[in-house]
Amino acid sequence: MKNSPTPRPVRAEFLKSAQSINDSVEESLSEVVFLGRSNVGKSSTINLLAGRKNLAKSSATPGKTRLINFFDVGYKLGEEDYTVRFVDLPGFGYAKVSKSLKEIWQKNLVEFIQNRTAIRLFIHLRDARHPHAKIDEEVERYIHSFLRPDQRYLTVFTKADKLNQKERGALLRDFPGAILISNLKKSGQERIQQEIFHTIFGAEF
Ligand code: GDP
């Protein structure tokens, strides 16, 4: 069989929706946390990364979205099998600037994010058209305020298809470590997979 240079999703399983750290799944695998404003394209991104159409539910779907959703995603890289746990956090709304992040996010969620040992990577999804949204800048600062040495923070800009080439170049100059993706065009997802594998398994691409 031909060796693939990028991880290829081969399995995906929904595990559980949890309200807090207390009813979460046990910490056994390395976890990747996805967070972002409602409607940023979080579920589209997760579904593309997992190779499944309807694994994660859009924030437009009533119900599911106030919960922490856990998925196990199986990848093949060359001949090897790997499993990564995805943790899909509730999307945060278009909050009023006067509200602090802790008012917007429930205490439960803050506790979860800060205390869960298995988290190795935070993927912060941001709209490429609004790179300096206040709430996102606050989230970035907040995550860096407790980020451990074994954890990484990654900015992923969604909806890259809404920018022209010049705007895309300018955005990446402003955010040198960021990844630009389009779920519509299905572009950029392999870069995220490589980041996940690099962070969790130390894989080089
Ligand atoms: P969520 O609420 O963050 O889970 O966002 P969804 O994945 O449900 O996406 C919200 C809306 O944005 C849907 O209408 C998607 O089709 C659209 N969307 C998501 N990603 C992209 C993208 O990269 N480009 C464009 N143009 N639309 C996108």
Image (spheres, rainbow, N blue to C red):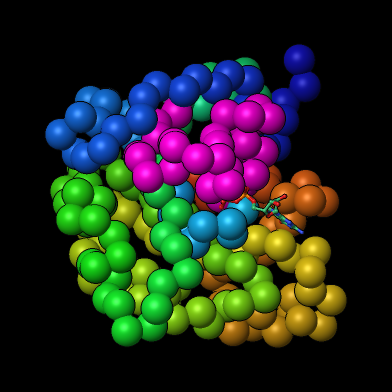
Residue 166 relative to residue 112: left or right = right
Residue 197 in view: no
Q: How many labels does the image show?
A: 0
> For the view shown, which residue lies furthest in the front direction?
62
Instruction: Find residue 153 and report its horizontal and vertical position in percent.
Output: 40, 61
Q: In which quarter of the image is residue 100?
A: bottom left
Judge whether 149 appears above or below 26 on screen.
Answer: below
Residue at horizontal 30%, vertical 77%? 99
Q: Does the magenta stretch include residue 43?
A: yes
Residue 186 in view: yes
Q: Nearer the viewer, residue 169 or 107?
A: 107
Instruction: Find residue 132 and report its horizontal and vertical position in percent.
Output: 53, 82
> For the view shown, which residue lies furthest in the top direction?
1
Q: Quadrant of residue 129?
A: bottom right
Q: Is residue 110 magenta?
A: no
Residue at horizontal 44%, vertical 36%? 64
Magenta span:
42-71
Instruction: Find residue 124 and report its horizontal and vertical position in percent.
Output: 47, 60
Judge whether 194 appears above or below 137 on screen.
Answer: above
Image quarter where the N terminus lies is top right
Q: In which quarter of the image is residue 174?
A: bottom right
